[in-house]
């Protein structure tokens, strides 16, 4: 009988990419994928520890999965990702139902680990590997859009952030290997890739060959059959004019930039160790807005950082109102063990953090509404990603600004087609329109 593997992924796109890698290794080890944990023989929880909340979810997920051990004595549970890296062996000690703990750098060791766990061992693999960062091409269930990791780790040590501790030092992946992966994906139907890194603007620094992110991106634009390129995350301190000029001139690179500001107050930015002032950030954004026609911006924010006063928070609100992002991702500050900020008094009450978060998200919704309404009447380029289950004439895709657009079409369309859609309605977080027949 074929064995089955189930995976539950928490956290960022990097984790989604890692989950795809993990699944492909299980496939090579004789497993089929399943979305139903009940029929699985191995369940993997790929975890996130960036904030306390996703970390708590891991505990309840273990609780939910362990009951399957009663009906299937061979059922195994693995904890992967950032929580695995952070807590290592302790997870095995605290949770008798967990069989394998595999950290963020341990994925290449998974072949052997699966074999050993199947034989009844319980093990934790949490070493960091400092050799070159390579990822062999792997099979995945990508539809028309795929994530591609171009670097791992982070050297920035923002004072609130656990990533440098759980993902290790920054390492770039060789550009030839990345381009080969993209070509492989394109040959298998992918039309859009999103390059992933914690700070893509420092891509290339650890490679022997001299190459920077803009040069790499230009090479990717030359891949025949690839229609769209996106990238996250650009760190504002390293984001530069060369990159803006390339985005402005290369039609394959989408006019969408995710540039996390985190806070509008210079005092807080300094305490966060972000390496830029609001004014420096604003100058870069102004250049990008001026050069890139139809640019959509997004950002991350943390509210309630230690010592954040009402005035500091007002500056964040002011920044959001001035810059007019199309989307923001905002979080209540959550102290992470071992980070510099965790030794600063977490002096903003949870109620106050929640108030600030609400204020910020409410302010953003007004801007999102305004920017989406402004797009009514535009004819936009949509990459078709699927069909509505309820209405056969309604399709779904994304515009170049990464916004979901649902649209009607009398004509039958295939996933991966690029079509023109006239926008007729703006919803809360998506757009609606009709296929433009030429
Ligand atoms: N490398 C990206 C950058 O520099 O913007 C961010 C990666 S981090 C995984 C994603 C987001 O989580 C951050 O931009 C930040 O807003 C948020 N975050 C990180 N640590 C946090 C913490 N301790 N509390 C609340 N939010 C946090
Ligand atoms: Fe964390 Fe800062 Fe690195 Fe982003 S750049 S992953 S926020 S340390």
Image (cartoon, rainbow, N blue to C red):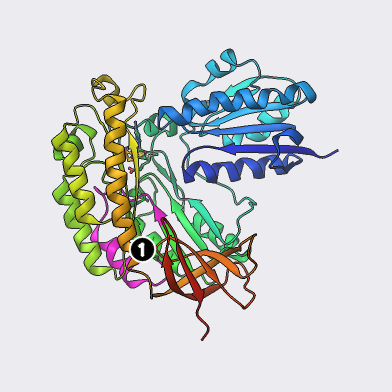
Q: Which residue is drawn at 58% across and 13% down?
A: 93
* Span of residues in magenta: 231-253
Q: Residue at x 58, y 60 (%)?
A: 185
**Number of numbered labels in the structure image:** 1
Tell which of 19 and 359 is nearer to you: 359
Tell which of 412 and 134 is nearer to you: 412
What percent of the width, then of the height, locates residue 321? 21, 52
Say which quarter of the image contains residue 73.
top right
Residue 252 magenta-drawn? yes
Q: Residue at x 45, y 72 (%)?
A: 381
What percent of the width, then of the height, locates residue 227? 49, 69
Residue on which disc 1 sits: 372
Task: Name the side, left or right, on which 25 lies relative to 316.
Answer: right
* Label 1 C-beta lies within 8 Å of the nearest ligand 1 atom: no
Task: Name the side, left or right, on which 13 lies relative to 162.
Answer: right
Single out the residue that lies furthest toward the right.
1
Residue 241 magenta-drawn? yes
Relative to 324, is 45 above or below? above
């Amino acid at each position: 009988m074929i064995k089955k593997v189930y995976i539950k992924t928490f956290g960022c796109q990097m984790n989604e990419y890692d989950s795809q890698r993990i699944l492909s290794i299980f496939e090579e080890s004789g497993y089929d994928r399943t979305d139903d944990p009940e029929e699985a023989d191995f369940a993997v929880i790929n975890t996130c520890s960036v904030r306390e909340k996703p970390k708590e979810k891991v505990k309840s997920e273990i609780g939910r999965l362990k009951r399957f051990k009663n009906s299937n004595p061979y059922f195994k549970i693995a904890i992967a990702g950032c929580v695995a890296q952070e807590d290592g062996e302790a997870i095995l000690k605290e949770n008798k139902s967990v069989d394998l703990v595999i950290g963020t750098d341990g994925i290449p060791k998974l072949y052997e680990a699966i074999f050993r766990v199947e034989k009844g061992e319980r093990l934790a693999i949490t070493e960091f590997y400092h050799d070159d960062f390579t990822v062999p091409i792997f099979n995945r269930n990508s539809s028309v859009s795929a994530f591609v990791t171009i670097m791992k780790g982070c050297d920035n040590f923002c004072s609130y952030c656990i990533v440098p501790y759980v993902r290790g030092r920054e390492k770039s992946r060789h550009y030839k290997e990345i381009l080969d992966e993209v070509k492989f994906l394109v040959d298998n139907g992918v039309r859009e890739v999103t390059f992933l890194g914690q700070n893509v603007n420092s891509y290339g620094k650890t490679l022997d060959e001299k190459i920077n992110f803009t040069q790499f991106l230009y090479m990717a634009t030359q891949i025949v059959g690839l229609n769209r390129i996106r990238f996250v995350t650009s760190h504002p301190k390293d984001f530069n004019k060369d990159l803006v000029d390339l985005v402005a001139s290369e039609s394959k690179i989408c006019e969408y930039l995710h540039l996390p500001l985190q806070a509008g107050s210079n005092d807080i930015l300094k305490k966060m160790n972000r390496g830029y002032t609001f004014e420096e950030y604003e100058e870069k954004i102004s250049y990008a807005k001026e050069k890139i026609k139809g640019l959509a911006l997004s950002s991350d924010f943390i509210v309630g950082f230690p010592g954040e006063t009402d005035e500091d928070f007002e500056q964040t609100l002011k920044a959001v109102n001035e810059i007019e992002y199309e989307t923001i991702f905002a979080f209540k500050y959550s102290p992470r063990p071992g980070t510099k900020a965790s030794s600063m008094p977490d002096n903003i009450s949870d109620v106050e953090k929640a108030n600030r978060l609400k204020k910020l998200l409410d302010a953003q919704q007004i801007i999102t509404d305004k920017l989406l309404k402004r797009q009514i009447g535009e004819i936009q380029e949509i990459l078709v990603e699927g069909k509505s289950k309820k209405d056969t004439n309604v399709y779904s895709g994304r515009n170049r600004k990464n916004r979901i657009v649902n649209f009607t079409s009398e004509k039958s369309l295939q996933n991966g087609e690029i079509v023109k859609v006239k926008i007729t309605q703006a919803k809360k977080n998506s757009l609606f329109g009709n296929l433009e027949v030429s």
